[in-house]
Image: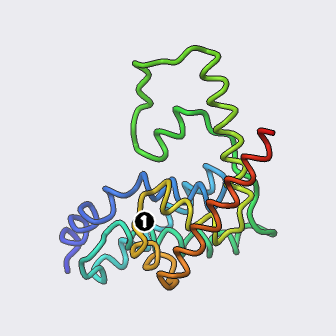
């Protein structure tokens, strides 16, 4: 394939999934700057390998590249495993996860916003505390919206393992958030 064909294919296959790629990288790296570096490197890998995309789920293909890039980048650039999730305000989270502009036409009261922010921070902290394989599966399913087969494809794990990890992650989150509210 020629350079222009590769660029057009990249634009069609990869670009629509960049917001999701950044959201996944943020959850894996726990840091916006690192996530941006990871996505940039993943885009280079995707562009170099765009002719290997044989159809199917472009989203799963892109997120697989992001996942692999994140783990290789983190192993090279971080001495110890993963760190806690950095603070995100609701508008930043919307932009990162959905590529939106954080529409505020239906603003809640300041009190409701404070409660929602505290609840979101508690949940975010509980997600960050999950073991990596549970956190990854939870994020891909409940935040990114991938189906079980796509998660199995992205993570290279059997479908039953995906289902088990997701159930365990959800149970741990319910336990963690539930005990904090008592």
Picture quadrant of residue 181 = top right
Closer-to-camera residue (94/9): 94
Quarter holding the N terminus? bottom left
Residue 126 picture location, percent across and down: 71, 52
Please tell me in which quadrant of the rendered image residue 150 appears: bottom left
Q: Nearer the viewer, residue 136 or 172?
A: 172
Question: Residue 135's x, y, as percent?
Answer: 63, 63
Q: Is residue 122 above or below residue 137?
A: above
Q: Nearer the viewer, residue 133 or 31?
A: 133
**Residues packed near mark 1 inside 10 Å, few (<14), some (14 to 19) or many (20 plus):** many
For the C terminus, the image quarter is: top right
Give the residue displayed 19% in from the left and 68% down from the top: 4
Q: Which image quadrant for residue 5?
A: bottom left
Coloration mode = rainbow
Residue displayed at 54% across by 59% down = 139
Mark 1 lies on residue = 43
Q: Position of residue 33 (x, y in %)?
A: 62, 51
Residue at 62%, 30% in the rendered image:
116
The reply, left or right, for residue 48 in relation to residue 12 is right
Tally of marks: 1
Q: Is residue 110 above or below residue 55?
A: above
């Amino acid at each position: 394939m020629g350079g222009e064909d590769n660029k057009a294919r990249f634009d069609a296959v990869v670009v629509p999934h960049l917001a999701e790629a950044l959201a996944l990288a943020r959850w894996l790296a726990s840091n916006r700057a690192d996530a941006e570096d990871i996505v940039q490197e993943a885009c280079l890998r995707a562009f170099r390998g765009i002719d290997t995309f044989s159809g199917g789920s472009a989203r799963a293909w892109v997120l697989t590249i992001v996942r692999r890039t994140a783990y290789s980048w983190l192993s090279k650039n971080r001495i110890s495993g993963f760190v806690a999730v950095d603070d995100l305000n609701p508008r930043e989270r919307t932009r990162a996860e959905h590529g939106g502009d954080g529409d505020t036409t239906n603003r809640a009261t300041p009190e409701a916003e404070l409660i929602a922010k505290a609840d979101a921070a508690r949940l975010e902290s509980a997600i960050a505390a999950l073991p990596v394989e549970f956190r990854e599966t939870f994020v891909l399913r409940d935040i990114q919206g991938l189906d079980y087969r796509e998660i199995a494809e992205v993570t290279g794990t059997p479908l039953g393992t995906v289902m088990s990890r997701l159930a365990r992650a959800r149970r741990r989150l319910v336990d963690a958030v539930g005990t904090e509210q008592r």
